[in-house]
Image: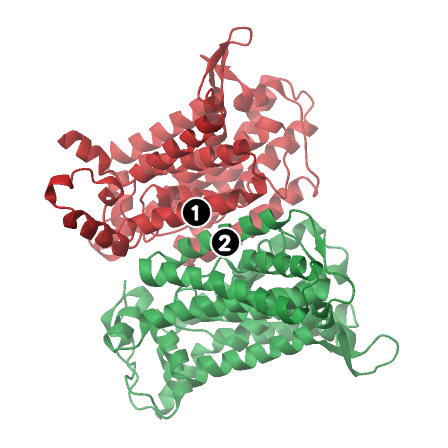
Amino acid sequence: MNRIKQILRVPWIGAIAAILLLLVIDLAKDPTYLSVTYNSTLGNLVGNVIDILRAAAPVLMISIGMLLVIATAGIDLSVGSVMAASGAAAMQFLSSAAHPESLGTAMTALALALHLGTALGTISGLLVTVVGLQPFISTLVMMLGARGLAKVITNGQNARAVSAPFRFIANGYIFGFPVVFLIAVAVVLLIALMCRRTALGMMIEAVGLNPRASRLAGLRARGLILITYTISGLLAAIAGVFATASVMVVDVSNTGYLMEMDAILAVVIGGTSLAGGKFSIGGAAAGALLIATLDKTVTFVGISSSATPAFKAVVIIALCLLQSQRVRTWLAGMRSRRGPASAAPAGPAGIEPKGVAA
Amino acid sequence: MSDPTGGAPLVPEPQPEPKRAGARVAANVPGRRGGRPARVGRGAGAPRDRFRINRAILPTLAALAIFIAMLVFGQLRYGHIFQYSTLSNLVINNAQMIILAVGLTFVIITGGIDLSVGAVVALSSVSGVLLSQQGWPAAVAVPIMIGIGLACGLLSGTLVRFFGVQPFIATLAVMFLARGLASMLSTKPVRLPDGSGILALGEPIKLVDGPKVNDLTVSAGVIIAAVVVVVAYFLLQRTRFGRTIYAIGGSEQSAELMGLPVQRTKLLIYALSGTLSGIAAVVFTARLGIAQNITGLGWELDAIASTVIGGTLLTGGAGYVLGSVVGSLVLGLMVVLITRDGGVPPEATTIITGGILLMFVVLQRAVVRQRK
């Protein structure tokens, strides 16, 4: 019983509940929605769930990067543009390469994209730490700059390329699972290990909670903050590779457009405060999965995908309301009136107090 | 974050010179941000005080200087800048951005942010055009368009005021909501019917009839923008409401302790910003005659950039409405100059915008550091 209570108390239980609710809606429309079949000729698993996992991979990447930045009380608005810039670099390189089908060329394109993203993230980080600009403005500048860079790289065209090894990153399967999702899970696990099995996560939280106290405790906030922006840039580049490799074309105006908002959303849904401090990797991952599920569900139910934002808004508003002190007090009042006997399941009120409003 | 000394020089009682009181709150910001003790202003009329006020306005003056420099540069390099038609067009084409930037100035001075303005413009203009297509007269459609803005602003304000949602998230939600609703209404460009009353608002009005097409013209939109700027200036610099806004940005805690209506003011500024988005939608639709669900994509960032260029600090507590007007004109003029040049590839435009923004914030940063 205590165990269940503890599980219900995780800050992102709302996200999980929302995902289940969306899946129920899908099931109501099509009872076979959740079925996953094995395609023996191609050796992969086929099903809507697999599609959702595949679609979740880029959002998952940028959400985790965003999470670390937000934990330092910063924000990274540039991730969407960095996705476009690194995707453009890879596509442009592949389209002008002599042997785009060779593994070496694909690896070079990948390395190029990842380095570019890392460099752009580091520049944002330097603007924040060394120049001392606010994260919002620094990354807004980078958002404009990286989007422009993507256009300059491809001369304003939508570069396309053909390269089987590069395409494999997004469309291939290993053990029946999509490669993108496996890579994404591996990266998330790596970051989680880095943060939770070393002191890195705690130090980032300390810097976000109280910069002054952490400085007095001997932490070099500058380096830590810089690292989070660099990681965010690198993860955005990975997301850019995912997004471009699946269609093998970079749309310089639309690739990654407004994705930064999705990432921020995922982080907030996961119960991490925008004011910085405590962060939850599991929460951000759940948030990213929720966004991917929502995207798929909206189109599956037959609503135009351009209307998806309205449903995201409903989800944010609902979760924010559930996390707000006023509603929680009200819910608690409702429960105590019903008497202690029926006050068992904590439901949404089990969310950590002040999860968002800090 | 909030250093109690940061709000110390705030004067609880209304001063005979409200503008000075507001400016003095503005001067506190560096003290609040860096955790450094703020320099406490003493007598209201001391000469040192006046000197410090000048410094708080420095970024705004710098923006003005750069705007003039850009004009002169454009005139020398490409010509035909200092002429009626160019300057009229600059204002006419940027009227809606001026209105949005004014609204954001209020929000940003309190330390908040409004990401929803661009999406609200889209929702409001699409609704307005669709209503006009149904044959509704402009006298009904225009108030509805402004009302949609107000409703969106009230929604963000309610989330911030009553449910403690951070402004960034609350307005992000409203941005998604407005954009999604606009997309549900129509995903194709919709056109105002000929002879619609809204179009009349965009008709150019000749003030000075110059040679050929070189006339000094304004539109009703420009007049609306001018009225908005004047009213906003008055509200911010000459009223209790305005000084409460500066006080919230200086230190919300101190403002609350002084008994200022912090929470009510927060609700009001988001409502104000939303209403101004509705007005901007009217002005924009009147000029173009077309609306689409992707209208105003990214305008919130342009408006924020205009505000920042105009000298408003994103941490709150300092900023001027007139600065934001200059800021939006700087961005508008930049587009004009890039078009005139012709040698700048269009894909580099966003890089240049980013560069100019960076230049301004670094300048601001230098000014703030100097004031330490």
Q: Which residue is drawn at 38% across and 34% down?
A: A21
Chain A tint as drawn: red
Q: Position of residue A247 (x, y in %)?
A: 61, 28
Mark closer to the observer (2, 1): 1
Distance (Cα) linking label 2 and label 1: 11 Å
* Relative depth, front residue between B299 and A340: A340
Tell me the subunit letter for badge 2.
B
**SS category of the residue bearing label 2:** helix
Tell me the subunit letter for badge 1.
A
* Relative depth, front residue between A65 and A133: A65
Q: Which colour scheme is used?
A: by chain
Q: Mark 2 points at which residue?
A: B175
**SS category of the residue bearing label 1:** helix
Q: Tell which residue pokes out farthest to the right in this image.
A: B212
Q: Where is residue A93 in the image (x, y as percent from the top left)?
A: 64, 31
The correct choice, above or below, for A321 with respect to B235 in the image is: above
Image check: A349 left or right of B219? Answer: left
Q: Position of residue B56 (x, y in %)?
A: 43, 77
In the rendered picture of this protein, how many numbered marks are placed on residues? 2
Could you tell me which quadrant the C terminus of chain A lies in?
Answer: bottom left
- State whether residue B309 appears in this view: no
The correct choice, above or below, for B122 with respect to B17 in the image is: above
Chain B tint as drawn: green
Q: Residue at x 48, y 52 (%)?
A: A139
Q: Mark 1 points at which residue?
A: A314
